Image: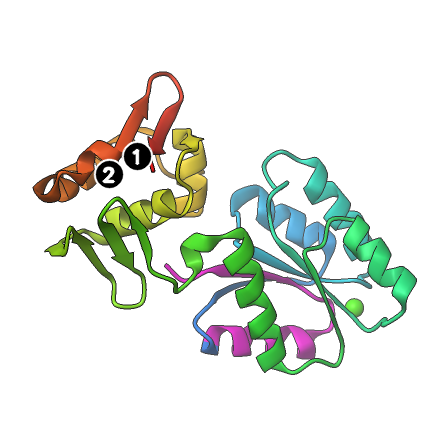
Amino acid sequence: MPATVLIVEDEPAILELVAVNLEHAGYETLRAKTAEDASRLLSDILPDVVLLDWMLPGQSGVALARRLRGDARTRELPIIFLTARADEPDKIAGLEAGADDYITKPFSTKELVARIRAVLRRRKPQHGDAPVEIAGLRLDPVAHRVTGNGAALSFGPTEFRLLHYLMTHPNRVYSRTQLLDEVWGDHVFIEERTVDVHIRRLRQALAPSGHDSLIETVRGSGYSMRQ
Ligand code: CA
């Protein structure tokens, strides 16, 4: 699943340039020209990363970052600040407001893509390229291939994403709502029951190698992958 990047930038030329380059690099983009536009978008859609301009008309980027960090739904959202300011005190203020990284204008799009990849690798390993392996179950995100004790297993696209997410976050319990947010990317339009359907399909797909037992149902809470 391509990661979605929300770009908050008031200068149309920069907004367009960044969006086009990120799309070219395989990301989906959402665009906002003000912090207020970004807030409206974020009430419907949770992106995987926010690129946030420091200087915005109306509410500043820093104020928006603080607000996102203060809301349970957006607390974990990775934020990279875009700014023309290179001063040390500003960098510190940005990081204190909850930014994951900081990139100073002018920047090369190559550098920007590299920073986004690094933040995603750190914060959202399900978007990474690295193969993951648990107890003989191996998932290779680049080849889109899963093997159980060396034998190929086949999955639908949603089950593949769900498995990738659970394998990169083992031993934690996720509620249906959290899984919808993280795997489907937007919890607004899908019923929670959908998660149960896909978990059932995922277990069926894992059954040939016996790895279905790795997925635990936690009564009243959700699902977990045991490592
Ligand atoms: Ca600006």
Is 7 inside the magenta-drawn segment?
yes
Is 49 inside the magenta-drawn segment?
no
Q: Quadrant of the C terminus?
A: top left
Q: Secondary structure at mark 1?
A: helix
Res 115 → quadrant: bottom right
Pointer 2: what residue? 198
Q: Could you tell me if the residues under marks 2 and 1 are in contact, i.e. CB atoms within 8 Å?
A: yes
Cα separation, mark 2 vs mark 1, equals 5 Å
Residue most toward the left?
208
* Residue at 19% in and 39% down: 211
| Coordinates of residue 199 in the picture (x, y in percent) | 24, 35
Residue 134 visible (yes or no): yes
* Residue at 60% in and 48% down: 77
Residue 35: assigned label: none
Q: Quadrant of the N terminus?
A: bottom left
| Amino acid identity at mark 2 | His
Q: Is residue 158 left or right of residue 86?
A: left
| Coordinates of residue 64 in the picture (x, y in percent) | 75, 49
Task: Tell me if residue 128 comes above or below residue 217 in the rendering.
Answer: below
Q: Is residue 131 left or right of residue 114?
A: left
Q: Nearer the viewer, residue 119 or 187?
A: 119
| Coordinates of residue 225 in the picture (x, y in percent) | 33, 36
* Residue at 73% in and 73% down: 11
Res 173 → quadrant: top left
Pointer 1: what residue? 195
| Coordinates of residue 216 in the picture (x, y in percent) | 29, 28
Q: Which span of residues is magenta-colored? A: 1-23
